[in-house]
Image (cartoon, grey):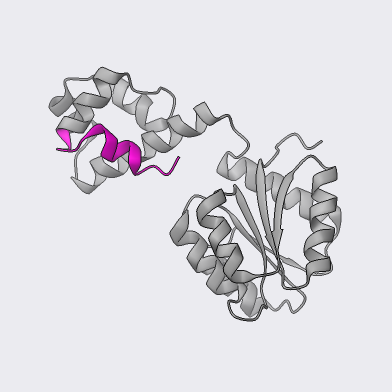
Amino acid sequence: MDQAIVSRILIVDDEPDMAENCRRILDAAGYRCLTTSDALEALRLLGSEHPDLLLTDLRMPEIDGMEMLRQACQIDPRMPVVLLTAHATLESAVAAVKAGAFDYLAKPFSLAQLRQTLRNAAQAFRLGRSPQDRLRERLGHAIKMLRVERDWSLKDLATHTRLSVSQISAIERGTNLPSIESLLAISKAFEKRPSEILGGIDF
């Protein structure tokens, strides 16, 4: 089983055999996979299942891989997307990366190539972490984004919350989960209810 395991992978390919072959290979390597050959179904699964990584074909009817990439980034900007194609060109690879794809694999690719790409994604996006780790990281990121939107420094937020700069820094980095008292203070500083901040992290 791979060391840096991605918990859930959504595989989208309009060729069902290709999607199923990928699933069997990755299941055997210890990954958990969802598969579909329907792009519209894939978008529904992105919203309902919240996979850790999307593995999608580039050329598909109805919705192609680039549009799938764009919509996936809107649903979850933190989710890595890997595009697969049997028609690889330098131009399409560059366009995919510019649009936000984590990687781009040309078919036929080897099992070693695919697994290395998933390991790289797991390391880069810190996937396969415990729910507690992910909650800390997402909540910390949400608080940091609220601070940045206000154009506040860490010291500014510390002044508004009466927390220390080191406390807030640890919360934003995802090292510490804020206590109830700290979360109430942070929420008050941003003129929000705690439920608004928690509801916005999509956890």
- Residue 53: x, y in percent? 62, 51
| Magenta-highlighted residues | 189-203
Query: Looking at the picture, does residue 158 appear above or below residue 150?
Result: above
Is 95 left or right of 5, judged from the image as shown? left
Picture residue at 36% right of the left edge, 27% below the top: 171
Between residue 191 and residue 43, name the one nearer to us. Answer: 43
Picture residue at 58% right of the left edge, 76% below the top: 63
Is 179 left or right of 59, judged from the image as shown? left
Picture residue at 56% right of the left edge, 44% below the top: 125
- Residue 102: x, y in percent? 60, 58
- Residue 175: x, y in percent? 44, 25
Between residue 48 and residue 84, name the one nearer to us. Answer: 48
Location of the N terminus by quadrant is top right
- Residue 183: x, y in percent? 27, 26
Task: Tell whether position 5 is magenta.
Answer: no
Picture residue at 84% right of the left edge, 68% below the top: 108
Between residue 152 and residue 181, name the one nearer to us. Answer: 181
